[in-house]
Image (cartoon, grey):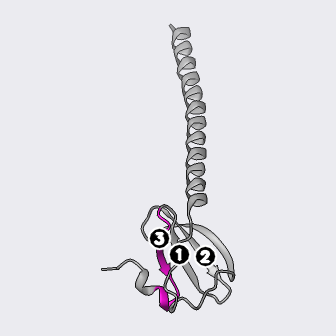
């Protein structure tokens, strides 16, 4: 009787170890797929440019200092691309749609989504 209990206990431990290994591998694959999907979205985003000739004089497009993709903590989900310029200004674009969602430039404020 004692050997049967030890055998069953051994089988249960083996199942837990194998299940943990399979679960870990599955989670790693899911994580890799999510990273690839995000990278694809970022690579496919085309910066939308404000097309108002008289208002967009602050940036000529050649003054980009950096571009970063950041988690949208304010919304709690999704990502945005932040472009920083030499003059210290920035623009933020939605990664999925490419639309302008934030800007430090006064001339861009009329193109931003309404906060109401």
Q: Nearest to the eye among marks 3 and 1: give it.
A: 3
Q: Residue at x 55, y 17 (%)?
A: 11
Q: Determine whether label 2 and label 3 are within 8 Å by CB.
A: no
Question: Magenta stretch containing residue 87, yes or no?
Answer: no
Task: Specify the segment rendered in magenta.
Answer: 97-108
- How packed is label 1: few (under 14 Cα within 10 Å), some, or many (20 or more)? many
Task: Residue 99: give its label.
Answer: 3
Look at mark 2 in the image and give the residue it sits on.
83
Give x and y (percent) for residue 15. Answer: 55, 23
Return the disc, 3 or 1, that comes first in the chain's sequence.
Answer: 1
The residue at the far top in this view is 1
The CA distance from mark 3 to mark 1 is: 8 Å
Q: Determine whether label 1 and label 2 are within 8 Å by CB.
A: yes
Q: Helix, strand or loop at disc 3?
A: loop
Q: Residue at x 56, y 50 (%)?
A: 37
Does residue 93 lie above or below 31 as drawn? below
Look at mark 1 in the image and give the residue it sits on.
92
Q: Helix, strand or loop at disc 2?
A: strand
Question: Magenta stretch containing residue 101, yes or no?
Answer: yes
Does residue 74 lie above or below 59 as drawn? above
């Amino acid at each position: 009787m004692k050997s049967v209990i030890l055998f069953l206990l051994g089988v249960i431990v083996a199942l837990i170890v194998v299940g943990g290994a399979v679960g870990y591998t599955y989670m790693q694959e899911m994580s890799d797929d999510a990273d690839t999907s995000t990278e694809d979205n970022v690579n496919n985003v085309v910066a939308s440019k404000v097309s108002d000739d008289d208002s967009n004089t602050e940036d000529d497009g050649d003054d980009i200092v950096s571009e970063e993709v950041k988690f949208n903590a304010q919304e709690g989900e999704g990502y945005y691309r932040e472009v920083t310029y030499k003059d210290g200004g920035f623009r933020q674009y939605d990664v999925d749609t490419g639309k302008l969602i934030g800007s430090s430039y006064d001339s861009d404020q009329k193109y931003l989504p309404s906060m109401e």
